[in-house]
Image (spheres, rainbow, N blue to C red):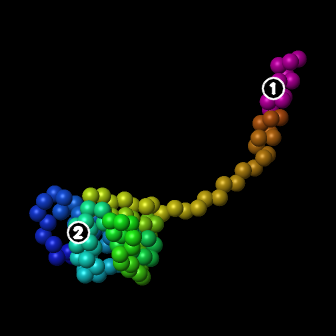
Amino acid sequence: MLKKNPETYNEIKTVSNILKITEHYHVSEEFLDEAYDFIVENDKNSIKCLKTIIHFVGADGTNVKTFTVDNVFGGIDGMVITKSSLTIVPHYTPYTYSSGSGGSSSNNNNNNNNNNNNNH
C-alpha cells in the first residue's frame, strides 16, 4: 500500500484514485508511491494507463516516464488519473452488424398488398 497518511478529503481522494490502478494492473508499492508523488507535484500532471503501458504525463502534455505493465486484469481499455479525477475507459468490443434485405422486401410486399386491397 501507499506509504502516505492522507489527512484531508482531497488527499484521501487522490490516494483512492491511485489505488484504483491496482484493481486493473499489477504494479509495485514503489510504483504507487511514485505515482502519488507525481500526481500531487503539479495539479496538471496525469497518469494515463493503457493496456500494457502506464505513462506519467507532465503538465505540458509530454510523457515524463513510461512503465511497461506485464499483467492487466480485463474489463477496461485504460484509465486517466489526475489529482482531482479518475476516468475509466471501458473495454470496447467491436461489433459486426449484419442486415438482411429479406425483411424489408417482405415488408414492402405487405405494404403493396395492403395498398392494393385498399384500392379495390
Which numbered disc, 2 or 1, marks the residue that appears first in the sequence?
A: 2
Q: Residue furthest top?
A: 120
Q: Quadrant of the C terminus?
A: top right
Magenta span dominant secondary structure = helix
What residue is at 31 percent from the left and 72 percent from the top? Answer: 22
- Relative to residue 92, is residue 101 drawn left or right? right
Q: Is residue 102 above or below residue 91?
A: above
- Relative to residue 82, is residue 51 drawn left or right? right
What stretch of residues is rendered in magenta? 110-120
Q: Is residue 101 above or below residue 31?
A: above
Q: Is residue 115 magenta?
A: yes
Residue labelled with disc 1? 114
What residue is at 38 percent from the left and 66 percent from the top? Answer: 61
Amino acid type at mark 1: Asn
Residue labelled with disc 2? 41
Amino acid type at mark 2: Glu
Residue 83 at what x, y percent from top left?
A: 26, 62
Q: Nearer the viewer, residue 42 or 112?
A: 42
